[in-house]
């Protein structure tokens, strides 16, 4: 096959490699890239922190909220957090654009704030269960479940002892 024939064949077949960086590169659906959190689904159970192989997830709390911090440059993309998260609030996206300059390593951080709520009975602040957890527990989130969810654990116990479903 002469050079001209090879050239014609290659032009006919088109590019055989990804166009990156002049276009986006495709990634497999199951690729384990940058971690993402759905703040509305997180129930603050801290399981992700417990299982995190790289020590990339840390929690802190103050009087108003629970704060979750993810250090992306420490994440080893093991996927354990996503496997053990009860509400699937944490996922590994197929975003592989995670390289960064050394001087930017402390900027590779995401913060998630999960605010506390006031108990509708006694007013004490607590971490209220989110809908995904309620769905897991009760399969439905009706008026009774919603009312109990708005109570702190102590008031919920009192309410449950009166016959309401816990
Ligand atoms: S992201 Fe998931 S595992 Fe981590 S605290 Fe939130 S609900 Fe729990
Ligand atoms: S993928 Fe692994 S290392 Fe990264 S945050 Fe999740 S548990 Fe931690």
Image: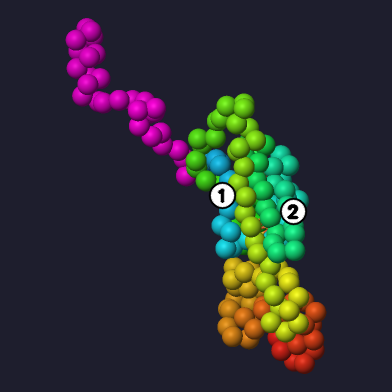
User: How many numbered circles does the render carry?
Assistant: 2
Q: Earlier in the sequence, mark 1 or mark 2?
A: 1
Direction from residue 161 to residue 16 in the image, left or right: left
Check disc 1 and report the residue beneath it: 36
Q: Residue at x 64, y 77 (%)?
A: 138
Q: Nearer the viewer, residue 61 or 88?
A: 61
Check disc 2 and report the residue beneath it: 60
Q: Residues within 10 Å of mark 2 (few under 14, many from 20)?
A: few
Direction from residue 154 to residue 22 in the image, left or right: left
The percent coordinates of residue 69 (x first, y second) are 67, 48
How was this image coloured? rainbow
Q: Nearer the viewer, residue 70 or 91?
A: 70
Q: Quadrant of the N terminus?
A: top left
Q: Is residue 73 magenta?
A: no
Prevailing secondary structure of the magenta residues: loop
Of circles 1 and 2, the one toward us is 2
Q: Nearer the viewer, residue 154 or 123?
A: 123
The percent coordinates of residue 37 (x first, y second) are 58, 53
The percent coordinates of residue 100 (x first, y second) are 56, 30
The image quadrant of residue 65 is bottom right
Region rendered in magenta: 1-29
Q: Residue at x 54, y 35 (%)?
A: 98
Q: Residues within 10 Å of mark 1 (few under 14, many from 20)?
A: some
Direction from residue 100 to residue 11 in the image, left or right: left
């Amino acid at each position: 096959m002469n050079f001209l024939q090879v050239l014609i064949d290659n032009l006919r077949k088109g590019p055989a490699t990804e166009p990156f960086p002049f276009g986006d590169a495709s990634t497999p659906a199951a690729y384990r890239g940058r971690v993402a959190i759905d703040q509305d689904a997180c129930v603050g159970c801290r399981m992700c922190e417990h299982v995190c192989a790289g020590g990339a997830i840390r929690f802190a709390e103050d009087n108003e909220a629970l704060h979750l911090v993810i250090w992306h440059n420490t994440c080893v993309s093991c996927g354990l957090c996503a496997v053990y998260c009860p509400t699937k609030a944490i996922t590994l996206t197929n975003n592989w654009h995670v390289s960064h300059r050394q001087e930017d390593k402390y900027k590779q951080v995401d913060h998630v704030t999960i605010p506390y709520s006031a108990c509708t009975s006694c007013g004490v602040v607590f971490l209220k269960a989110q809908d995904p957890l309620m769905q897991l527990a009760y399969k439905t989130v009706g008026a009774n479940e919603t009312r109990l969810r708005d109570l702190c654990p102590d008031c919920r116990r009192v309410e449950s002892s009166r016959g309401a479903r816990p």
